[in-house]
């Protein structure tokens, strides 16, 4: 896979192609940006481009080096990551890295150390890495990958060149999904908007029933005689029960609240956009295939009421992580929304 196949990160590809050509690479980088936008993939492709046996500043994907890097079994490319269920990256892994950095590459021009979830290092591991960064070795590059650069120590940050990855535009994700998957167009359209610029997230949404759940929620929440307690019970029984741990239930609740949030965002768009902007409205809505229901529902609400619900939901999302009683939280938010709906209709 050449650099050009990496989606929507042209600013980074240009930067590295020039840096490779001019031999002006840093000894350490931080790749930062949200989950699922290609940071790890880019790290792998960068390792190939540097060690590829063909000429130029990109990879051929055919030589022994490219093939072995692709399979994660090249002796000069080291991957460090947190073990499943472990809270942090093991200190031994960073110590091993510290020792290996001093040795010359075995087979290639560069030794490359890639640390995934670099924000998941405890104090001891961070300090050990810091020492390594303070004494750079020739022909060695360390890449830290993170979704949250603020969680990385300042002292580490200041010794690395920071590379920011951008969210992938909606139309690019939509085209990718259409090209590669045989799924319903409305589903693809909704996912490419809901995934928040992350292809990883989009692929995950495509393989589960999130879109179908969203449709159920939209249908229920726009029903004229929706009983809030019955609906809250439904949410708890059919959706939240799928999570085993409190943490999983929190994640499910967050995505349900995001669905409700997008529903009210759509209602607001319908409310504020004038009728001449039909095309623009279609482009902006999350639930385009439900426009008729939304239009009807929006008639019952004022702009202020819609904004009030949006605020309520945003506040609830913020408190999910601190709230032990998830069921009560969902009951409260649904009650507040439905009370508003029934007032509006009466
Ligand atoms: Zn190659």
Image (cartoon, helix red, strand yellow):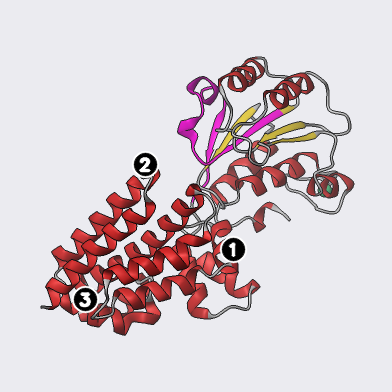
Position in image of residue 59 (x %, y %): 76, 49
Q: Report which quarter residue 231 is drawn in.
A: bottom left
Position in image of residue 247 (x %, y %): 49, 47
- Region of the chain picked out in magenta, as a range: 141-166
Task: Mark 2 and mark 1 in contact? Answer it, CB < 8 Å.
Answer: no
Q: Which residue is mark 3?
A: 298
Looking at the rendered image, the quarter that the C terminus falls into is bottom left
Distance Cα–Cα, label 1 vs label 3: 31 Å
Q: Secondary structure at mark 1?
A: helix
Q: Does the Cβ of the disc 1 residue fall within 8 Å of ligand 1?
A: no
Q: Secondary structure at mark 3?
A: helix
Mark 2 or mark 1, whichever is nearer to me: 2
Question: If you read the primary sequence from the N terminus, does the residue marked by circle 1 or circle 3 appear first?
Answer: 1
Q: Which residue is mark 1?
A: 203
Position in image of residue 246 (x %, y %): 48, 48
Distance Cα–Cα, label 3 vs label 2: 32 Å
In this view, 83 is above or below 307: above
Looking at the rendered image, the quarter that the N terminus falls into is bottom right
Q: How would you rate the neighbour count of disc 3 (Cα within 10 Å): few for under 14, some for 14-19, many for 20 or more?
A: many
Q: Does the Cβ of the disc 2 residue fall within 8 Å of ligand 1?
A: no
State the mark number for residue 322: 2
């Amino acid at each position: 896979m050449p650099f050009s196949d990496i989606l929507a990160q042209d600013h980074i590809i240009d930067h590295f192609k020039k840096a490779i050509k001019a031999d002006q690479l840093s000894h350490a980088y931080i790749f930062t940006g949200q989950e699922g936008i290609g940071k790890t993939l880019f790290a792998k492709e960068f390792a190939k481009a540097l060690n590829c046996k063909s000429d130029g500043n990109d990879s051929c994907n055919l030589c022994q080096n490219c093939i072995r890097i692709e399979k994660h079994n090249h002796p000069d490319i080291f991957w460090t990551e947190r073990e499943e269920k472990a809270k942090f990256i093991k200190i031994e892994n960073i110590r091993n890295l510290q020792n290996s950095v001093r040795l010359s590459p075995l087979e290639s021009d560069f030794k490359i150390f890639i640390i995934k979830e670099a924000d998941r290092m405890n104090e001891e591991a961070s300090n050990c890495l810091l020492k390594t960064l303070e004494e750079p070795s020739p022909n060695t590059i360390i890449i830290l990958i993170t979704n949250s650069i603020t969680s990385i120590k300042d002292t580490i940050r200041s010794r690395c060149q920071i590379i920011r990855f951008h969210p992938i535009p909606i139309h690019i994700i939509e085209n990718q999904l259409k090209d590669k998957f045989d799924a319903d167009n409305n589903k693809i359209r909704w996912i490419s908007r809901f995934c928040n610029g992350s292809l990883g997230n989009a692929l995950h949404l495509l393989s589960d029933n999130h879109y179908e759940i969203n449709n159920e929620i939209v249908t229920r929440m726009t029903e004229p005689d929706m009983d809030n307690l019955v609906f809250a019970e439904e949410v708890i029984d059919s959706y939240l029960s799928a999570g085993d741990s409190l943490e999983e239930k929190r994640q499910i609740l967050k995505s349900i609240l995001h669905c409700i949030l997008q529903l009210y965002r759509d209602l607001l768009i319908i409310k504020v956009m004038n009728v001449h902007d039909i095309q623009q409205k279609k482009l902006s809505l999350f639930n385009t295939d439900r426009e008729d229901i939304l239009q009807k529902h929006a008639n019952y609400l004022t702009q202020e009421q819609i904004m009030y619900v949006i605020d309520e939901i945003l506040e609830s999302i913020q408190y999910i992580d601190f709230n032990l009683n998830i069921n009560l939280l969902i009951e409260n938010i649904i009650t507040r929304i439905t009370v508003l709906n029934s007032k509006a209709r009466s």
